[in-house]
Image (tube, grey):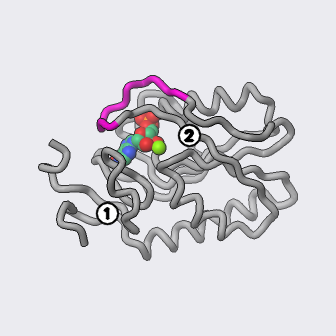
Amino acid sequence: MLNDIQEVLITQEQLQTKVQQLGRQISADYAGKDLLMVCILKGAVIFFADLVRHISIPVTMDFMAVSSYGDATQSSGAVMILKDLERNIAGKHVLIVEDIVDTGLTLKYLVENLAARHPLSIKICTLLDKPERRKAEVKVDYNGFTIPDAFVVGYGLDYGEAYRHLPYVCVLKPEIYN
Ligand code: IMP
Ligand code: MG
């Protein structure tokens, strides 16, 4: 384990079990429907890659990159599309796959933005939910884990672009954040 880590919150085993459950649930819920899974880069990339391998129905994928944080641990509230979807989503059932819902500002913006493109439905699947910090109301349809108000990294989540590769979700030592 890396020296910078204070505590592992969610282990590799817990992540894999949960991702498998979510994949089964999503597959059942969208059976017979034209499902498009949208990965929100970069944070959701590991979760997304694991999750889609547990989807047992036909599915297509697209990728979107948004920026709301810069390198800090505080939300600016402003959302910028860095990379848009490649394909039209009209007539599709869209499932947004995110790493974490914190203030909710990013997802609120994303849902409104994608809804304007006339998909058949939009739902949200997030690995982590930090409800204590919510500023904008968002309906989370699939949630892996509800976590307390701590800044976490690993399994796709970063601090200053580092730590995304860690196979578990953890909290760093306080001195790393200062
Ligand atoms: P929101 O707009 O405040 O909900 O924040 C969404 C984005 O902030 C997420 O997609 C993450 O990229 C980032 N974020 C929020 N909390 C954390 C955290 O604890 N660790 C790493 N990134 C986070
Ligand atoms: Mg993110």
Above or below for 102 versus 54: above
Callout 1 secondary element: strand
Of pointers 1 and 2, the one earlier in the residue sequence: 1
Above or below for 120 versus 42: above
Callout 2 secondary element: strand
Q: Is residue 103 visible?
A: no
112 left or right, relative to 79: right
Residue 73 placement: quadrant: top left
Measuring 47% from the left and 34% from the top, which residue is drawn there?
67
The magenta stretch spans which residues? Answer: 71-80
Task: Judge the density around disc 1: few (<14), some (14-19), many (≥20) Cα neighbours within 10 Å.
Answer: few
Q: Nearer the viewer, residue 164 or 29?
A: 164
Q: Is mark 1 within 8 Å of ligand 1?
A: no
Measuring 58% from the left and 58% from the top, which residue is drawn there?
48
Q: Is residue 32 visible?
A: yes
94 left or right, relative to 103: right
Rounded to the nearest angstrom, the CA distance separating label 1 from label 2 is 26 Å
The residue tagged 1 is 9
Measuring 51% from the left and 73% from the top, which residue is drawn there?
17
Q: Position of residue 16 (x, y in %)?
A: 50, 72
Q: Position of residue 54 (x, y in %)?
A: 66, 70
Measuring 70% from the left and 66% from the top, which residue is drawn there?
55
Q: Amino acid at mark 2?
A: Ala
Label 1–label 2 contact, CB within 8 A: no
The residue tagged 2 is 65
Examine the structure image and report whether residue 104 is included in the region drawn in magenta: no
Question: Taken as a whole, is the magenta stretch helix, strand or loop?
Answer: loop
Above or below for 30 versus 42: below
Residue 164 placement: quadrant: bottom left
- Quadrant showing the N terminus: bottom left
